Image (spheres, grey):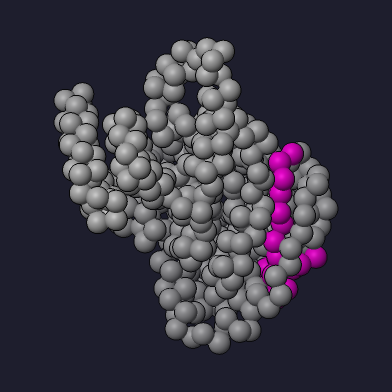
Amino acid sequence: MLACRWSSLMDVLKINEAHIAYCHRPGLGRTVVFANSLGSDQSIWDKVIAALPRGYGVLTYDLRGHGQSDGLAETIEGLADDVSQLIDALGLKDILFCGVSIGGMIGQVLTAKRSDVIRAAVLCNTAPKIGTAERWATRISAVDSNGVAGIAADIVGAWFGPAYTAQKDHLALHQMMVGRTPDTSYTAACRAIRDADLTDFAVSITVPTLCIGGSHDQSVPPDAVQALAQTIPNATLEIIEGIGHLPCLEAPETLARLIVQSDPAADDQADAGMTIRKSVLGAEHVNRAVAQTTSLDAAFQSLITSGAWGTVWANPDISARERSMLTLALLAATGNFEEIPMHIRATRRTGASERDIAQCFQHVAIYAGVPRANHALKLAKQTLKEMAADD
């Protein structure tokens, strides 16, 4: 398995007779799903992900025929179905989709068809129809004659604005990425773009959508992105000055900020809180607590669901693992030992390891007292033993 720089391991699923390589970092609540451009792989999102709040879930994947994925693209609708099935296979329900170029075309189809799971979309440097038949015929002919590697320098040279183009080492790195794309895979994707007119999908998008363009984009000029924003009901437009076709590489911090700004706040803190509460503590535990609610503690249950889980735990600025560690340390430091076993069990879902737990109580010993840390460790050891026995 290949390692993702921001996750653990790249994984693979067979979808529509193709092996789709992906990296998934679970989070609390919303997951940002990224889709690449023509000729690139999922690494183009690394710096964007590094700039996002760590509490977001993240999913990247390689389009079929790109990166580590095999298969050939036939239509944009088919490519959208690949990611739709990947989302379902991972059980994702609360998504902000971000795609660039052909990834943005995929996003137009997916967002129109899957409003059941997609809450917002960021469509970068894309349009319902990109280029002309003549332009794509010229590109396909060039690949047939010289191979993708033979024209990689020309492809990459047209991607960026003047400031980024001056960074020759970066361009060489991107050229190697493009050049690794199989010729047949690249031309198949070209034909899928050439044959697509997604206007009917764009006009039926109902979720909040931000359309992003680059002032120096030669592939999808700003006026084409503006036309897309005018086609999608209630969409907004952002043209980033000085960049070309790939804001994820030229302006990753700016793109990350725009993604966060495009994330609609939860309409109902109670609903969001209940979802996160179940994801951390386990649905069985929460359902049991809710079933035992009486008139005496109904207001309290509402308070912790909306207040603790719908605000503090729902905030994506830090990860679920970090929140889990903070919670355990604070419970031990304040002597609230009765809740420690419940939150030790929750570490299985938050990603906090035994080493993390040990470090929490090391800090408690230094800053809050050895007896409290000692008792917390005793509870943790017993709970972990019970968890192992349950397994």
Instruction: Describe residue 263's horizontal placement relative to residue 383 as left or right.
Output: right
Which image quadrant is residue 237 in? bottom right
Q: Is residue 152 magenta?
A: no
The image position of residue 221, as x and y in percent, is 74, 68
Instruction: Describe residue 250's horizontal placement relative to residue 133 as left or right.
Output: left
Query: Can the viewer see residue 324 in this picture?
Result: no
Q: Image point 61% across, 84% down: which residue? A: 163
Q: How many marks?
A: 0
Front residue of 207/161: it is: 207
Compared to residue 218, the image places residue 62 above or below, namely: above
Query: Can the viewer see residue 161 in this picture?
Result: yes
Q: Image point 81% across, 57% down: which residue? A: 227
The image position of residue 338, as x and y in percent, is 31, 30
Q: Is residue 214 magenta?
A: yes
The image position of residue 208, as x and y in percent, is 72, 45
Quadrant of the frame with the C terminus: top left
Q: Image point 80% across, 60% down: which residue? A: 226
Front residue of 88/295: it is: 295
The image position of residue 21, as x and y in percent, is 39, 49
Q: Image point 74% across, 63% down: which residue? A: 238
- Look at the image and give the residue range highlighted in magenta: 206-223
Front residue of 303/305: it is: 303
Compared to residue 339, the image places residue 175 above or below, namely: below
Instruction: Describe residue 154's horizontal placement relative to residue 126 as left or right.
Output: left
Front residue of 59/175: it is: 59
Compared to residue 183, the image places residue 354 above or below, namely: above
Which image quadrant is residue 261 in? bottom right
